[in-house]
Amino acid sequence: MSLSPPPAPASTYSSSIDPASPQAIIEADSDHSDVAESCNTSTKSVNQSIFDYVKENGRTYHRYQAGSYLYPNDESESERLDLQFEILKVLFGGRNFYAPLEDPRKILDIGTGTGKWAIEMGHQFPRCEITGTDLSPIQPDWYPSNVKFVIDDAAEEDWMIKPDSYDYIHTRVLLGCFEDFREVIRKSFRYLKPGGWMESQEYMHTVYCDDGTMGSDYAFAEWTKTQDSAAMQLGRPLRIANKLKRWYEQAGFVDIHEEVYKLPVNSWPRDPQLKMLGRFSESSLLDGLQAFSLAFFHRGLGWTKDEIEVYLVNVRKAISDRNVHAYHKM
């Protein structure tokens, strides 16, 4: 739905969730012989202490604002983030954004991670200044001259520039990263130029199934509930995707659009592209499961690393079970 915006307010394009939205049923493949394959000139200047990462349970975590982000920042997680970027790009038909950008001059990417999105946007819009912010300096040393990376906490600090400055603000897969994502939305509204756009692309943490193949004992679904409980204990909610549209409306955004996509958990679909996406999704989930679990379960629930690893054995089996036709909404 497109609305005529009143003077001055910013707009939003939210690729998030409406759980009740009617979606086409994905047809399952009856051939289970498929086996998931493992998918495995500028410089930045930061204080050297930033690289003195926090070590916990065999993984490393950001030093800056230590403890506020619950996912690791080590090489294996960076590789998984790059895989996640490629998965979403294919899911979105090769697009990095949906907002109607024409000639933006300032773009902010909150939680830029490895910086792949910001770098691609820098190539696509060479006259635009792209700023990617993150708590960890895990971005590459070489990138377009119109791109810069800043170590910053979007939840706590000023955004380095005066209000009404950005043409476009982007967030992607930030569930569990903030105490209150509404504050990020409110800040975005303030820092966007009149007529600017905000866009969020977010996973719905819940696992869905349309054909009854996901039983009540499905270990991956049970894991999501356990992680959700730990996240709430730690004040880092995971269930934000289905609330984004309402939160944007409350912040004052207009001309709001929402798209919902299904991303299979593994390669169970018959459709070749969805099968491929499912295969890589499975790899991403298996590669990231420990990263998604350690800090949440250890800090939030008091579990030891050994207890967590034993618990994850059946979860990994469930993720790879093609008899269960599970998917996430994006």
Image (tube, rainbow, N blue to C red):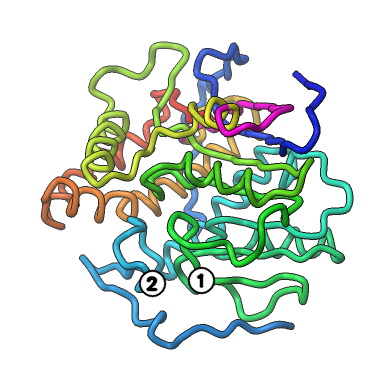
Q: Is residue 119 left or right of residue 153?
A: right
Q: Are marks 1 and 2 in contact (CB under 8 Å)?
A: yes
| Residue 22 x/y as whole percent | 59, 11
Q: Secondary structure at mark 1?
A: strand
Q: Amino acid at mark 2?
A: Tyr
Q: Disc 1 or 2, which lies upstream in sequence? A: 2
Image quadrant of residue 2?
top right
| Residue 160 x/y as whole percent | 60, 67
Q: Quadrant of the N terminus?
A: top right
Mark 2 crowdedness (10 Å alpha carbons): few <14, some 14-19, many ≥20: many
Q: Nearer the viewer, residue 198 or 76?
A: 198
Q: Which residue is mark 2?
A: 64
Q: In the image, which residues are magenta?
A: 250-265
Q: Secondary structure at mark 2?
A: loop
Q: Which residue is mark 1?
A: 151
| Residue 162 x/y as whole percent | 66, 61
* Residue 178 sits above or below residue 93 on the image: below
